[in-house]
Amino acid sequence: MSQFWNRAKQVMLGCCTVLAFLLMGFGATSLQLKNLHITPCPDTAEYSNMVTSTANPMAAKCLFIEGTVVNRSKNTLVNADVFGRLYDANGNDVMPERTRLGAIEEVPPGETPFSIRISVPVTNPLPLTMEQFKASGFSGTVRR
């Protein structure tokens, strides 16, 4: 019976080593976000009649979160997720169930401007405040 446990320990150690290797090689790379600001969407048909993506559809304002993403790595990163909290003029959390606000498809090394479109219920008064914003990307394609 002790041979079984010794072998089980060896297999577990091997699996953990492989997993650690994979996570180091393919893990997310942190990105810096700067010059963040929010702008309204253009007043065109493409951005009119917006609704929120909640269970109860309601009229929404179309906005863009814009800024610069800084990739200090030497690799082009893909599928960079942008996370943050948005609060309205009254201090209410605009998207309480959601911190992932969108993604940047490709981030080359250096500084790159980005823009993410969001929908905010018309009942939330502007201006919005942005807090705890961060981003991370991957050096290879991530399957979803």
Image (cartoon, rainbow, N blue to C red):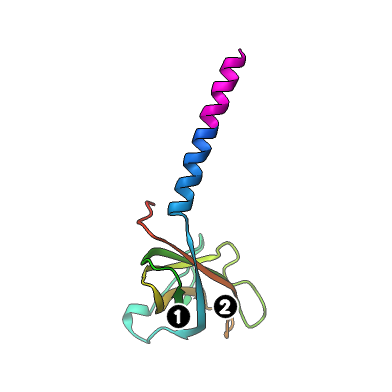
In this rendering, the count of numbered labels is 2
**Residue 112 image position (x, y, % from top left):** 39, 79
Disc 2 target residue: 123
Snapshot quadrant of residue 89: bottom right
Q: Which residues are magenta?
A: 1-12
Residue 142 vs 66, above or below: the answer is above
**Residue 40 image position (x, y, % from top left):** 45, 85
User: Which mark is first along the chain, 1 or 2?
Assistant: 1
Q: Is residue 63 visible?
A: no
Give, as a three-letter code, the residue at label 2: Thr
Check residue 68 in the rendering and tell me which mark sits there, or answer none.
1
Between marks 2 and 1, how big is the CA–CA gap? Answer: 29 Å
Residue 36 vs 118, above or below: the answer is below
Q: Which of label 2 and label 1 is nearer to you?
A: 1
Secondary element at image label 1: strand
Determine the main secondary structure of the stretch shown in magenta.
helix
